Image: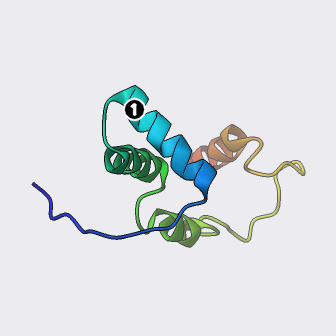
Amino acid sequence: MATMHRFQMCLPHDLHQFLVRKAERDGVSVAEVIRRLVIRESADAPAAGAIEYALELVGMCSGPEPLRDDVPVSERPDMYLADAILSVED
């Protein structure tokens, strides 16, 4: 079992009542409701460092070549791939 950490927090009355009602509906403690909410929220969050890693990728594939037919690569990657393949075959 994972190490548990105890902490206290203050909530406005309406949020506390929400947690109490949800705990009663789910048949669990208020602490368990909070744990489940935090687990669900953390599962939706990007992995640690994922955003920084993605930002490092920005611009890695840029090149000095001009646009092909005034079309950026993001709109027509197939056109850029075809140009790259044809230039290798020449």
Amino acid marked by disc 1? Glu
Which residue is at 69% across, 47% downward?
80
Quadrant assignment for the N terminus: bottom left
Q: How is the image coloured?
A: rainbow
From this view, report whether residue 54 is shown above or below residue 31.
Answer: below
Q: Position of residue 12 (x, y in %)?
A: 61, 59
Residue receiving disc 1: 24
Q: Position of residue 76 (x, y in %)?
A: 75, 41
With 19 as the anchor, is 60 left or right in this view? right
**Which one is in front, 66 or 29?**
29
Disc count in the image?
1
Look at the numbered disc 1 and give the secondary structure of its residue. Answer: helix
In the image, farthest residue toward the left: 1
Q: Position of residue 2 (x, y in %)?
A: 14, 59
With 3 as the anchor, is 69 left or right in this view? right
Which residue is at 37% across, 46% downward?
30
Which residue is at 47% across, 56% downward?
46
Q: Position of residue 59 (x, y in %)?
A: 64, 69
Which residue is at 39% across, 32% downward?
24
